[in-house]
């Protein structure tokens, strides 16, 4: 079974692209530019985009923590 995010191409989006997609969805929904069913579909896509953004942010935070820890260890060895 394939992941819906992969089918929608969400997994390949950068953080910035995902945010742009979310912004576009919000604009369309706020301005009533789509029927209810389309709004629901876009809501579902928006939730997937949010999940993708959170994953990217968590990975970035882990990377920052790892870099910080490595630098602290490096400084301790130099002392």
Image (tube, grey):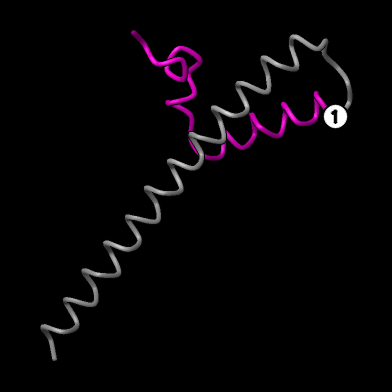
| Residue name at image x 86 percent, y 17 percent | 33
Is 36 within the magenta?
A: no
Residue 78: percent from left, percent from top? 12, 86
Identify the element where label 1 is drawn: helix
Q: Based on the picture, tell me whether residue 27 belongs to the magenta stretch.
A: yes
Report the magenta residues as a range: 1-30
Q: Is residue 3 left or right of residue 50?
A: left
Magenta span: predominant SS is: helix
Task: Tell me the quarter of the picture where residue 20 sits.
Answer: top right
Residue depicted at x 51% and y 39%: 53
Q: Which residue is mark 1?
A: 30
- Of 65 and 71, nearer the camera is 65
Q: Dividing the image into 4 quarters, which one contains the C terminus?
A: bottom left
Instruction: Give coordinates of residue 42: x percent, y percent.
Output: 68, 19
Q: Is 75 situated above or below 15? A: below
Q: Quadrant of residue 25?
A: top right
Residue 37 in the image: state x and y as whole percent: 75, 9
Q: In the image, is residue 79 above or below residue 8?
A: below
Quadrant assignment for the N terminus: top left
List x then y, in percent, for residue 14: 48, 35
Residue in the image at 30% along x and 69% along y: 68
């Amino acid at each position: 079974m394939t992941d819906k995010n992969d089918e929608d191409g969400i997994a390949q989006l950068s953080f910035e692209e995902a945010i742009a997609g979310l912004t576009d969805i919000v604009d369309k929904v706020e301005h009533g530019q789509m029927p209810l069913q389309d709004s629901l579909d876009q809501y579902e896509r928006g939730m997937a985009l949010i999940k993708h953004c959170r994953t990217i942010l968590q990975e970035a935070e882990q990377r920052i923590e790892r870099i910080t820890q490595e630098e602290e260890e490096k400084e301790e060895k130099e002392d």
